[in-house]
Amino acid sequence: MTASTLQTLFQHRQYAKCLDYISRNVHTPKPVGTWLIQGLSHAALQQRDKAVEILSYALNQYPRHAELTVQLSQLQLQNEMFNDALATLNQLEIRHPQVSLLKSKILTGLKRCADAMESLNDAKEIGLDALSYHSQLASIYQQQARLDLAICELEKSMSLKENDFHQQYQHACLLRELGRQKQALKEFLSLYPQGKQLPELNFVIGCTHYDLGNYKQTEEYLERCLALAPYYVPAHECLGKLRWQQGRKNEFLNSFDRTRHAHPPHPVLERSRIAQLLVTGQYEQALDSANWARRHFSEDAQFIHLTGVINKRVGHDEQSIALLRQAATLEPNNPRFQIDIANHEIKCHEYQSAQERLAPLLKYFPDNQELWAYLGICWRLRGDERHLWLNNYQKYIQTFELPVPSNFDNREHFVDALKKTIGHYHSPGQEQPLDQSVQGGSQSEGHLLFLQNPIIQAYRTSLEQVIKEYLASLPIDSSHPLCRHNTGRFKIAGSWSVKLANKGFHTNHIHSQGWLSGPTYLSVPSTIHQGDPMRQGWVKFGETCLGLGDREEVALAVCPKPGQIVLFPSYIWHGTYPFTAESPRMTLPCDISPLG
């Protein structure tokens, strides 16, 4: 066999044969083309980590080789190794439209949207085709959570390349996120003859039917998804959620159990099964499932940890802490494992030990909101003034009046219109979510601010005005987890509505996926008022979920009123006091992410 034969094998997509040939016939020093085929063959076989390793080594042998550099950078982008991808690409000192386009994609992944736009415009200036330009511009707008602009750019791209499956699928997904489910479903179904063997398409059609209340069709398409991909965990979870909400609790885990009996055990599926049992409070069944998984995956630290968590829930404290410590020893840099041990240590007054366990992890996970939240507890209970630097309740928790759009005569009328609009997204008799802080209430689905409703979009404009004001007030502090990311640019990463009924409340929690968070109050019953010594319905800050008794501290409490917005760092502990009232307490919370 010759090098040309190797090239032929690669062109015919015989990737395993390529790797076999290279291992048997090619000796160092390898030509650059052989390195490329070896790396790209691993990538084509979904061995991306190995592909990155191969091409990284090759690039050391052939520094600044253009094709090697671009291919490695693309693989690092696909692996979401954005900083590595950018460092690799920056070694190239050439100006080319495809290189600038690739850089724009990497910068988008890093949430540096302004820089991504600049690189994209440079690519356009030196000859990037219109199709690639509009497609990438849509991706930048998606990263900024501006789906209205993203869909416009995608439609321009689609007009340049008709009947492109990927673009039509992306367009339908955007329609769904924008609340245009009927249009989205029509578009998904038009793709179905072409893509009915794709688990993802069956899954998203099922989810769109769920949005529209077509629950029979939801089950049908989710089951089709699982017939194609038995380990497709989101489909299992959605089926379980649907059946639980419909009161079919004896069918809750049917799909998990069917897959377990028909296919080899899969660790990700088993972890999901245990998680579903935990959120529904079925602790004994969860313990049985965790023990079953440990027998099949004895080396998997995740199952050791989960068994420890469940033992705690059923009151087996000694077994729990032994298992949690075992998992933490096996994976010392796993934040979840170390946080759960630290929780135990905090409860046992071992604050120094908990702090020494958590603090080193910030080197690897500097933006982990839970790490900061639990470190703040350690610092406060040790009398370390860093807890004041971190939380500074007076500085970082701010209240605002919702700005009134020009087409409303006052705030009361605007809030009333917003309340009526948002009320449509809470179904009568809707159960509280399984895995949220809401107790005694309901929570809307999806990202509300993506909906192209004029009232909601007017609210979005007002909210963004308040967020800008908040960010402008922050001090400059390159070490603070909130302030160091403040460029003044941001995106609203999540928005939903919570409707609390009589005696409802939020348990104490943080927003682990956020950076900045806060609710807008739409409806506040008359029993919630400033003069109430019981603080019914007030939001409280500082008290944790650990149940530390007299060691807990409510550092600040805010009495809500309609049209008020409260913003605070996502790592600050917060919850609400229960209230008694016939009318509901309704809020519009959101999570905000920084843009670099």
Image (spheres, rainbow, N blue to C red):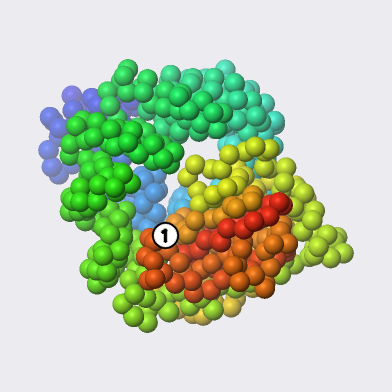
Q: Residue at x 64, y 49 (%)?
A: 501
Q: Nearer the viewer, residue 581 or 310?
A: 581
The residue that mark 1 highlights is 545
Q: 152 above or below 328?
A: above
Residue drawn 83% across and 59% down? 413
- x and y, in percent, of residue 250 in the image: 45, 24
- Residue type, numbered disc 1: Cys
Quarter containing the N terminus: top left
Residue 123 shows up from this direction: no
Whether residue 16 is visible here, answered yes or no, is: yes
Residue 78 to residue 483: above or below? above
**Left or right: 294 as drawn, with respect to 159:** left
> Relative to 16, is 70 above or below?
below
The foreground one among 295 and 27 is 295
Count of labels in the image: 1
Question: What element does badge 1 sit on?
Answer: loop
Report crowding for label 1: few under 14, some 14 to 19, many 20 or more residues within 10 A (C-alpha): some
Residue at (60% x, 42% y) in the render: 445
